[in-house]
Image: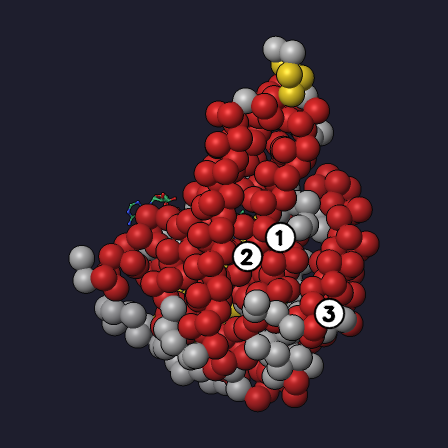
Amino acid sequence: MYFNEEHDALRSMVAKFVDKEINPKVDEWEETTTPLHELFKKMGGLGLLGITYDEKYGGQGLDYWFDLVFLEELGHIKAGGVPMAIGVQTHMATPAIHQWGSEYLKETYLKQAIAGDMVTAIGVTESGAGSDVASLKTRAVRDGDSYVINGSKLFITNGSQADFVTLLTRTSDKPGYHSYSLFVVPTNLPGFQVSKKLDKLGRRCSDTAELFFEDMRVPAENLIGEENEGFIIQMKQFQHERFYSLPANYVGARDTIDMTVDYIKQRMAFGKPLIENQVLRHRLVDWITQIECLKQLTYHIVRMKMEGLNATKEISMGKVLAGELGFTVANGCLQMFGGTGYINESLITRNFRDTRLTSIGGGATEVMKDVIARIEGF
Ligand SMILES: Cc1cc2nc3c(=O)[nH]c(=O)nc-3n(C[C@H](O)[C@H](O)[C@H](O)COP(=O)(O)OP(=O)(O)OC[C@H]3O[C@@H](n4cnc5c(N)ncnc54)[C@H](O)[C@@H]3O)c2cc1C
């Protein structure tokens, strides 16, 4: 109904890539870390890191339905840390450069990110500023042709492998939101330091790090958009980040259900397969009904994006649903696996651990609800 042969061709290309280049390796990457330069180089070669971006910078210049197809297929990856790393590259750290960056920034950084020659990270969160982004303390001070940056960022995905960080800093003491600026910060300049990969509950194959900036001089031309307008730009960039989480979530949840159905069809208890218990079948149906609701909301958001409409409320609603649904399904399916589901070598335990993040990262559920309430005028 929504897709033509060109969408199908992209879907099959991404599906093949996931089956051949990602899923066979995720068990190993969970133990080590996803090698992002190697993975992104392959994806860049296939044009997968710039689906909607301008062809001038190596993108494919395709519309949001193609983007949706791409993100849906990432939902089949059997470790949540991999789509998150890819999402940082395509939907979290680069949209602002594409939309507000100078020609220099697009030529020097966006092009390399789309080609997979540079790994990117998005640096917003700090130890004292997570949900409350405006309380961040990292500061950039203009000095001649440079900005001098001091501060630190916490929980940064792709952080220890990144070639540049799209970094939100304070640039003025004035109260209000027009006191922050967004920069492209190359990690090979003096004054940059990165911690070792942080040890996490889930998404263990993803590289999450703490970044430090000490008297780091960054050329003034690395400013994205206008000075002091970075907060507003980042809030807009967050819409891409939050949208990215929807398709992978409903696709991943459906895969989890299918895997669970396969298991409870053959698992015998009290003389019959578990699937023959109506209570379990109804629970599964409740979840696939909610999955369909999230999918249809996502398709509605794509239609809004295609029309150039502001979908902040709908994306926030989708993020709330995705965060709750993904974990509810993983947790409920783990219950159906019984003791087997509690053993680390089964995929359901990884799904349980990995899905816990969606309602926290990139805008916690409560923050999303505040956004929706504000738009509704409550
Ligand atoms: C694995 C991982 C990867 C991440 N990757 C990145 C990254 O690449 N770049 C980046 O910048 N950040 C990243 N983050 C940070 C993430 O976005 C933050 O953790 C998130 O925004 C929440 O901030 P916080 O952890 O400081 O929680 P806090 O702000 O301390 O909030 C704690 C909890 O309080 C509740 N809460 C918060 N505000 C309200 C409110 N107004 N009303 C009611 N309840 C509320 C929420 O339940 C929230 O979970 C990552 C985090 C993790 C764990």
User: In the image, which is nearer the foreground, mark 3 or mark 1?
Assistant: 3
Residue pointed to by mark 3: 9
Is residue 313 found left or right of 163 in the rendered image? left
Residue at 25% over, 64% down: 375
Residue pointed to by mark 1: 75
Q: CA distance from mark 3 to mark 1?
A: 17 Å
Q: Amino acid at mark 2?
A: Pro
**Residue 228 percent coordinates (x, y):** 36, 77
Classify mark 3: helix, strand or loop: helix
Return the residue nearer the eye: 7 or 353.
7
Dot placed on the residue nearer the N-terminal end, 3 or 1: 3
Classify mark 2: helix, strand or loop: helix
Q: Are marks 1 and 2 in contact (CB under 8 Å)?
A: yes
Q: CA distance from mark 1 to mark 2?
A: 7 Å
**Residue 240 percent coordinates (x, y):** 49, 66
**Residue 99 percent coordinates (x, y):** 50, 80
**Residue 287 percent coordinates (x, y):** 48, 40
Residue pointed to by mark 2: 247
Return the residue nearer the eye: 10 or 49.
10
Q: Label 1: how many residues lie within 10 Å, few (<14), some (14-19) or many (20+)?
A: many
Is residue 367 found left or right of 100 in the rendered image? left
Q: Is residue 324 visible?
A: yes
Residue at 55% over, 73% down: 64
Q: Is mark 3 within 8 Å of ligand 1?
A: no
Classify mark 1: helix, strand or loop: loop
Q: Amino acid at mark 3?
A: Ala
Q: Label 2: how many residues lie within 10 Å, few (<14), some (14-19) or many (20+)?
A: many
